[in-house]
Image (cartoon, rainbow, N blue to C red):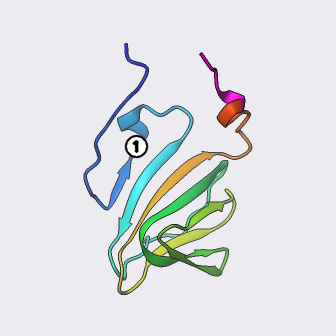
Amino acid sequence: MANYTKTTVAKENRTELHDALALTGAEISLNTLPAGAGVPFVHSHKKNEEIYGILSGKGHVVIDGEEVPLAAGDWLKVAPAAKRQFSAASDSELTYICIQVQENSLEGYTAADAVVY
């Protein structure tokens, strides 16, 4: 049995990788909003923080009533309780990755979690 899972993702408006990669500690989605479009709902979470990476395009997110501009190369962490809603600019689609993990669950990372052989 292989110690990895691989998938190939086509360009779609939303792709969730939880099932495709059999993820057990995170949810990852790839998202594209067409120019002028927005996520049709405001949401928050009970336990999970979200990390967003803007891959291309521009737009904005409204977090707890504050509008935050977004452009390719931006990264953003949003606390679970924050109310958020993403939108693409009127003249640009917005493509981003969203990584969702339980807040305060990281116990070791990088070298602290590595085993060197």
The region drawn magenta spans 112-117
The correct choice, above or below, for 66 with respect to 27 in the image is: below
Q: Residue at image x 64%, y 60%?
A: 77
Residue carrying label 1: 17
Q: Left or right: 75 with respect to 79?
A: left
Specify the amino acid type for callout 1: Leu
Question: 91 left or right of 101?
Answer: left
Residue 54: horizontal and vertical position, in percent?
Answer: 48, 65
| Residue furthest to the top | 1
Which is the main secondary structure of the residues drawn in magenta? loop
Residue 79: which quarter of the image? bottom right
116 falls in the magenta region: yes
- Viewer-closest of 2 and 90: 2
Hey, which residue is sitting farthest front in the picture? 117
Mark 1 surroundings within 10 Å by alpha-carbon count, few (fewer than 14), some (14 through 19), many (20 or more):
some
What count of labels does the image hold?
Answer: 1
**Magenta residue check for 28:** no
Q: Residue at x 55, y 68 (%)?
A: 74
Q: Position of residue 71 (x, y in %)?
A: 49, 75
Residue lying at 62% horizontally and 55% vertically, measured from the top left: 45
In this rendering, the answer to whether 25 lies above or below 89 is above
The quarter of the picture where the C terminus appears is top right
For label 1, the SS is: loop
Q: Name the image quarter holding residue 26.
A: top right
Looking at this rendering, what residue extends furthest in the bottom direction? 90
